[in-house]
């Protein structure tokens, strides 16, 4: 049942006293108990650093009535900024609720209202995820977009709220597109309008590689066209739908903005009881406590090497132009590599191949098979070009053009947003997670560019430190086997000693006389844990042999391929190609069917041997997995090591959430603690970004000694019997040149 909604436009209140009167009345009626302030921002764009809010809708509810206000920057800039300040100050006594609230906090910062660590921030996007069994939309969970969620779960008419704005945006887009097409038709060359449109949609070439006449026309369009069109053309799109909300009817936009507050309220009121019923308030607290740290991390961004970015963008554009020409020569027609149906048609009709699909895995498998038979075959060339162009065009359009665009606007840093709830397990995601560790190569193997060379240290900083968790998920898997009383000694020995000796003075022998003291490692003995790396370790069965930690990937490989010499080059390749991939897959509960898909080149007998290898190498892990499957038969949820509950999971998702989820929340907790340390010590050093299990820090000159404390905090895991290790890397140049160090001198 919808609440009765009453709203008053703040622009009608005229003055700050009117606003303060409304706030005073609200606090008096709620008596400060359970009071919440809901707010949002409508902005000039999506850049968290350079865009600004032009509307701030906000409100609160008392009983069954919600009071929604909206202030317009164009009406009264001073009142606008003061309102934003008052709203955040009011929230100090209560709570500040928003949908994807980190973005709105960035917008407030851009008008001078800085992050306040004393506030209690609540994000309804997090509430949605926790209230719906933590499932992502891809796994059957709810949509995370506010309007989409409200339409599906609250009020089917919610989507109607933006119809007026959508219609106006569409109308403006048509006008701009008409102007663009008129300019396209003026080109008197062999290039048809259709070809030019396809060209820009597929990002085939650089401006410099265009026909001179076409290039001149393009430059003319770029200079004269409205900004929304120009912006889309630089990203390879002809038609524009990027019409900013500032250009739309203001009254309709205000109504749209106010209803966003309504839906945020309703989402909060719907989700909180579900979270309480699932006893997941602890998970909510952990997520909300790290919001300030993530906002500061996002605000830092990355310094770009503008000269290198421009160079590699041009180099890649030229290389793409050449490779597209090669593809044209092979096919005799202009095609785009995103046309899967067309690619399949060519493979069937031209090369007589019966292919199940043209996705990455299918084409890679076909490519490897055909190349092994005849590496010079034309079809091998064709598939190789398609795969290469798909990868490089994505890099060109998604990353390089984005970097260049920011540089063209005069910006020297690139920013991204972190999604706290991007996965079922709780692992954070961002578009920077996909940056490869290695260079992007040409077809002949020479380096085209290295993406991580685009990211450099800021001028005023000494360098960038990277703290990367070492095999944290396998360490947590080892810990889980101990916690359920089925310790897998093979896995534990990869990260912990099994038996040790240390030298002790024996007074009965006399001063200066020592003897070796052998002692079996006790997982639950704090003294043994504290000295895990101080003593020398041996196998229990042979105390004369130096103890060697288990190589988990080699262990699985040797079981799967018992006839392959462990010292051979073949074994080394199998360790990376099979052993490592199997370990992570089985660690997340992958079954035979998944293993078969992962290794299509092997027969069923070999697949069965690979599938069995992990559990044979680490039998304690198998017992732990069986334990997990038994638990969900008795209760509807499982809890990770931080008390976060996952409902409705089974199979590999169940195992994945326990191991990966524990790693995710370990990292989240440590991000929060390092941030608190930085703030408490008033350091100028700052966290840049989280990439998988790694956190990067820009280190200010004279603060290098604090990196050891960052490392200590990250390696802290109270109650763990398995040591958590964060390797330290350092660079004074760029991301690609980082090197492992013991400490920063």
Image (cartoon, rainbow, N blue to C red):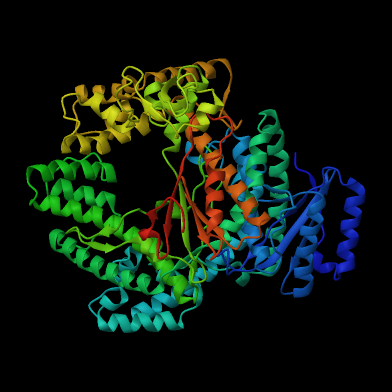
Residue 707 spot, x, y in % from top left: 53, 53
Identify which residue is drawn at 41% across, 38% down. Answer: 471
Q: Is residue 289 visible?
A: yes
| Apparent side of residue 679 relative to residue 590 in the rendered image (left or right) | right
| Apparent side of residue 92 relative to residue 335 in the rendered image (left or right) | right
Where 683 falls versus 269 (above or below)?
Answer: below
Identify which residue is drawn at 66% across, 46% down. Answer: 289
Q: Quadrant of residue 666?
A: top right
Residue lying furthest front in this view? 510
Q: Is residue 359 visible?
A: no
Q: As rendered, which of 725 and 176 lies closer to the eye?
A: 725
Where 152 falls versus 214 (above or below)?
Answer: above
Which quadrant does the N terminus fall into?
A: top right
| Apparent side of residue 396 relative to residue 663 in the rendered image (left or right) | left
Q: As rendered, which of 187 and 467 lies closer to the eye?
A: 467
Where 646 falls versus 188 (above or below)?
Answer: above
* Number of numbered discs visible in the structure rendering: 0
Q: As rendered, which of 382 and 695 lies closer to the eye?
A: 695
Q: Quadrant of residue 215?
A: bottom left
Identify which residue is drawn at 22% across, 35% down. Answer: 574
Q: As rendered, which of 417 and 438 lies closer to the eye?
A: 438
Identify which residue is drawn at 13% across, 59% down. Answer: 330
Residue 601 spot, x, y in % from top left: 19, 34
Residue 324 spot, x, y in % from top left: 22, 64
């Amino acid at each position: 049942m919808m609440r009765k909604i009453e709203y008053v436009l703040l622009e009608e209140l005229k003055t700050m006293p009117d606003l303060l009167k409304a706030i005073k009345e609200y606090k008096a009626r709620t008596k400060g108990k359970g009071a919440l302030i809901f707010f949002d921002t409508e902005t000039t764009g999506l850049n968290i650093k350079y865009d600004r809010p032009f509307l701030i809708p906000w409100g609160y509810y008392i009983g069954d009535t919600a009071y929604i206000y909206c202030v317009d920057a164009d009406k009264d800039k001073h009142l606008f900024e003061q309102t934003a300040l008052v709203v955040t100050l009011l929230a100090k006594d209560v709570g500040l609720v928003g949908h994807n609230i980190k973005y709105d906090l960035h917008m407030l910062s851009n008008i001078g209202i800085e992050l306040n660590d004393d506030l209690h921030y609540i994000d309804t996007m997090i509430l949605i995820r926790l209230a719906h069994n933590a499932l992502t939309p891809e796994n059957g969970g709810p949509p995370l977009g506010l309007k989409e969620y409200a339409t599906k779960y609250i009020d089917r008419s919610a989507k109607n709220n933006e119809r007026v704005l959508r219609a106006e945006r569409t109308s403006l887009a048509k006008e701009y597109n008409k102007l663009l097409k008129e300019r396209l038709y003026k080109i008197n060359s062999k290039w048809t309008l259709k070809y030019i449109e396809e060209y820009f949609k597929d990002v085939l070439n650089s401006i410099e590689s265009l026909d001179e006449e076409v290039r001149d026309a393009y430059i003319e369009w770029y200079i004269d066209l409205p900004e929304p069109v120009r912006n889309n053309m630089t990203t390879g799109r002809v038609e524009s739908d990027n019409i900013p909300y500032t250009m739309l009817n203001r009254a309709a936009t205000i109504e749209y903005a106010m209803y966003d507050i309504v839906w945020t309220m309703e989402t909060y009121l719907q989700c909180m009881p579900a979270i309480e019923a699932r006893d997941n308030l602890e998970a909510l607290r952990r997520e909300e406590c790290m919001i300030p740290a993530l906002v500061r991390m996002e605000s830092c961004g990355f310094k770009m090497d503008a000269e290198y970015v421009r160079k590699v963008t041009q180099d890649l554009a030229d290389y793409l132009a050449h490779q597209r020409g090669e593809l044209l020569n092979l096919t005799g027609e202009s095609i785009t590599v995103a046309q899967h149906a067309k690619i399949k048609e060519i493979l069937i009709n031209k090369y007589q191949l019966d292919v199940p699909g043209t996705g990455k895995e299918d084409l890679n498998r076909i490519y490897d098979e055909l190349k092994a038979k005849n590496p010079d075959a034309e079809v091998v060339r064709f598939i190789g070009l398609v795969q290469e162009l798909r990868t490089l065009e994505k890099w060109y359009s998604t990353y390089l053009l984005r970097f260049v665009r920011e540089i063209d606007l005069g910006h020297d840093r690139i920013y991204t947003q972190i999604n706290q709830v991007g996965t079922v397990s709780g692992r954070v995601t961002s578009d920077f997670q996909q940056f490869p560790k290695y260079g992007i190569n040409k077809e002949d193997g020479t380096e085209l560019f290295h993406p991580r060379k685009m990211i450099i240290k800021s001028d005023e900083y000494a360098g960038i430190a990277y703290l990367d968790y070492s095999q944290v998920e396998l360490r947590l898997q080892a810990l889980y086997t101990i916690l359920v009383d089925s310790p897998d000694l093979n896995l534990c020995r990869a990260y912990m000693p099994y038996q040790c000796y240390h030298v002790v003075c024996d007074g009965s022998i006399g001063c200066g006389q020592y003897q070796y003291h052998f002692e079996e490692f006790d997982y639950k003995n704090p003294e043994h844990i504290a000295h895990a790396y101080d003593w020398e370790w041996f196998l229990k069965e042979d105390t004369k042999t130096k103890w060697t930690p288990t190589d988990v990937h080699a262990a699985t490989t040797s079981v799967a391929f018992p006839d392959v010499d462990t010292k051979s080059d073949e074994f080394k390749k199998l360790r990376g190609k099979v052993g490592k991939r199997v370990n992570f897959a089985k660690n997340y509960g992958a079954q035979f069917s998944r293993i078969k898909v992962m290794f299509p080149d092997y027969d069923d007998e070999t697949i069965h041997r690979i599938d069995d290898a992990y559990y044979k190498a680490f039998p304690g892990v198998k017992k732990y997995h069986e334990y997990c499957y038994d638990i969900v038969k008795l209760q509807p949820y499982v809890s990770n090591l931080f008390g976060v509950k996952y409902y409705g999971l089974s199979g590999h998702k169940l195992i994945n959430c326990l191991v990966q989820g524990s790693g995710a929340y370990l990292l989240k907790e440590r991000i929060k603690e390092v941030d608190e340390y930085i703030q408490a010590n008033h350091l100028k050093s700052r966290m840049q970004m989280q990439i998988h299990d790694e956190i990067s820090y820009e280190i200010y000159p004279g603060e290098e000694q604090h990196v050891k404390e960052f490392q200590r905090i990250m390696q802290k895991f109270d109650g763990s019997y398995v040591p958590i290790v964060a390797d330290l890397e350092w660079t004074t140049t760029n991301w690609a040149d980082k090197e492992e160090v013991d400490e920063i001198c």
